[in-house]
Image (cartoon, rainbow, N blue to C red):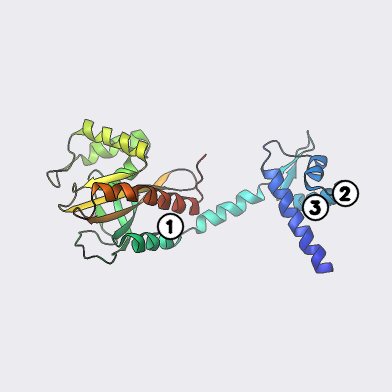
């Protein structure tokens, strides 16, 4: 019976935290009691304990209760412990199994992308990419997906420093055309590499955002152009966009 009461108290405490978190200006004891349909003395006792441990604090002017800074401390520790590769692994494997194509995970670093994960799929495909290797941003789908969501001043600086060097005759080397491409990437939510980096290879990528809303990585599907037709790319769009959103959510990112 005692254990049952303890579990009930914990459950009520969690409910109170949830109610308090949903109201920007905080809630009073009466409001919480009414929403939970329990007496005010019980609510007050739970709130007093939560205040004692720093999970809730009381506004001295209004008397209302709001979330305490303890949650910020805990969340920062959680975010520090998040490993991008580990969080993305299951989603990348899922994408590999569904498409049977090469799946890449890259991070942005000093004006380039760095491959940190590569799943080879079940189909034979020769690509220059490998874990640890760097690649340019302007002619890869992953690079474009990241560039399109970087602050404009940062993206411009990268393009000025790195330029738009020729890789294939399909590489976009005109700056105005490339900037228009980035606008389209932001609108659509995905980027394409139509044999712009390697002949015979077509790729589609989406950005990955961290808990601050900053783009930090990208995930892509790569396959031979003969398989990555317009129809197939269209069919893959919603799936890869969803995968990007799921990985971003695992990193603490939530769209407003």
Residue located at (41% from left, 53% from top): 243
**Whether residue 164 is situated above or below residue 101 in the rendered picture:** above
Tag 2 and tag 1, C-beta contact below 8 Å: no
| Total marks in image | 3
**Residue 165 lies in quadrant:** top left
Q: Which mark is residue 46?
A: 3
Residue located at (27% from left, 36% from top): 181
Callout 1: few (<14), some (14-19), or many (20+) C-alpha neighbours within 10 Å?
A: some
Q: Which is nearer the eye, 190 or 45?
A: 190
Name the quadrant of the N terminus.
bottom right
Mark yes or no: residue 23 visible.
yes
Residue located at (61% from left, 54% from top): 74
Q: Which is nearer the eye, 37 or 165?
A: 37
Rounded to the nearest angstrom, the CA distance separating label 2 from label 1 is 45 Å
Q: Which residue is mark 2?
A: 41
Instruction: Tell me which label, 2 or 1, sits earlier in the chain.
Output: 2
Callout 3: few (<14), some (14-19), or many (20+) C-alpha neighbours within 10 Å?
A: some
Mark yes or no: residue 109 visible.
no
Rounded to the nearest angstrom, the CA distance separating label 2 from label 3 is 9 Å
Callout 2: few (<14), some (14-19), or many (20+) C-alpha neighbours within 10 Å?
A: few
**Whether residue 153 is situated above or below residue 11 in the rendered picture:** above
**Residue 58 lies in quadrant:** top right
Q: Is residue 105 left or right of residue 18?
A: left
Q: Is residue 78 left or right of residue 148?
A: right
Q: Which secondary structure, mark 1?
A: helix
Residue 72, horizontal then vertical, whole percent: 61, 49
Instruction: Tell me which label, 2 or 3, sits earlier in the chain.
Output: 2
Q: Which is nearer the eye, 51 or 180?
A: 180
Q: Which residue is mark 1?
A: 84
Instruction: Tell me which label, 3 or 1, sits earlier in the chain.
Output: 3
Residue 123, horizontal then vertical, whole percent: 24, 65
Residue extending farthest to the front is 231
């Amino acid at each position: 019976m005692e254990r049952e009461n303890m579990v009930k108290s914990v459950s009520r405490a969690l409910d109170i935290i949830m109610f308090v978190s949903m109201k920007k200006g905080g809630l009073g004891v009466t409001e919480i009691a009414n929403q939970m349909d329990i007496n005010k003395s019980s609510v007050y006792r739970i709130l007093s304990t939560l205040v004692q441990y720093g999970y809730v604090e009381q506004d001295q002017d209004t008397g209302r209760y709001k979330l305490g800074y303890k949650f910020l401390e805990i969340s920062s520790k959680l975010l520090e412990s998040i490993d991008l590769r580990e969080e993305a692994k299951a989603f990348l494997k899922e994408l590999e199994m569904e498409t049977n194509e090469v799946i890449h995970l890259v991070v942005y670093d000093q004006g380039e992308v760095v491959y940190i994960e590569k799943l080879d799929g079940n189909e034979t495909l020769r690509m220059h990419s490998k874990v640890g290797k760097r690649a340019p941003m302007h002619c890869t789908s992953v690079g474009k997906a990241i560039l399109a969501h970087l602050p404009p001043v940062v993206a411009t600086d990268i393009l000025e420093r790195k330029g738009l060097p020729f890789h294939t005759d399909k590489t976009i080397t005109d700056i105005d055309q490339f900037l228009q491409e980035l606008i389209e990437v932001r609108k659509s939510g995905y980027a394409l590499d139509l044999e712009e980096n390697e002949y015979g290879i077509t790729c589609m990528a989406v950005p990955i955002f961290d808990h601050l809303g900053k783009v930090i990585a990208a995930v892509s599907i790569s396959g031979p152009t003969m398989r990555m037709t317009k129809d197939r790319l269209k069919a893959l769009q919603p799936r890869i966009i969803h995968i990007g959103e799921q990985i971003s959510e695992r990193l603490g990112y939530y769209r407003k």
